[in-house]
Amino acid sequence: MCYIWLFAAPGPRPPDMTAPAEPRIAFPPGTRVAVIDLDGTLLQGMNAERIFYLHLLVAGHVSIFRMLGFLFSVLRDVVRIGFRPAIGSNARLLRGRTPGEVRQWANAFGQAFLRKAVPDDLRHKILSLKREGCRIVLLSGSLQLLVDQLKERLEAEILIGNDLEVAEGVLTGRKTGIFPYGRMKLDALFQRIDPEGVDWARSWALADRFSDLPVLELVGRPVAVHADRRLRRLARAKGWELIG
């Protein structure tokens, strides 16, 4: 059996969060999975979260002043804690909004853009893996409410993404959990699933960047999709499948 996932990263959730804590998933021995990245892989050259924020600005849900304040806060965090931690923790643009309001915006964004942005050839590849018995897992550093938009289109069973922190019923402007970059993608993945029952040698991973190497090397059937130069060169040397 093979499981298909989409890349997104969870983490410990405080009691007052947008979603309840989920138990770690254990699979029967021999389970096959397909772990799939979102930004740059399913969305070639695109980042779902950044496009979502631009969509909110264009749709009038946030003002230009709020957007400028958000960008300034990201820059300040980059100086203070570094680029990756800043991107992985800052959601100031959504501060003060309710979870229901933001999810409504995400649903509209998913219907208008995100679900249509996944190319048909990749969708068919994923669905073929599912028909072969794989379990589909989407693992992404984008917001969980954006990753959720692709559940039906990709028939994904496990969706892992960043949650938004909530206090007194509104968003605080911070993300929670592990930001999955480099080896931390494995931390995010294994926090959600128990690796013991998975047949990694017969499992799949689809990703686009050299930084995704820890996940690609975890499985016996890695696929470089819309790969950057370093990953493309390595994939050719190792004989990995290349798409795009």
Image (cartoon, helix red, strand yellow):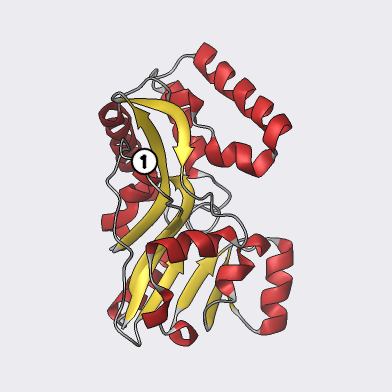
Instruction: Please say whether residue 164 is visible from this viewpoint.
Output: yes
x, y percent for residue 64: 52, 14
Residue type (three-letter) at the residue carrying disc 1: Pro
Quadrant occupied by the C terminus: bottom right
Q: Is residue 29 left or right of residue 81?
A: left
- Where residue 59 sits, quadrant-wise, is top left
Residue for point 59% across, 76% down: 217
- Where residue 56 sits, quadrant-wise, is top left
Residue 3, relative to residue 60: is it above or below?
below
Quadrant occupied by the N terminus: bottom left
Residue for point 55% across, 42% down: 88
Residue for point 39% across, 72% down: 194
Q: Is residue 78 left or right of residue 214?
A: right
x, y percent for residue 155: 28, 63
Of residues 214 and 51, the one drawn nearer to the viewer in this rendering: 214
Q: Which residue is mark 1?
A: 14
Of residues 38 and 175, the one drawn nearer to the viewer in this rendering: 175
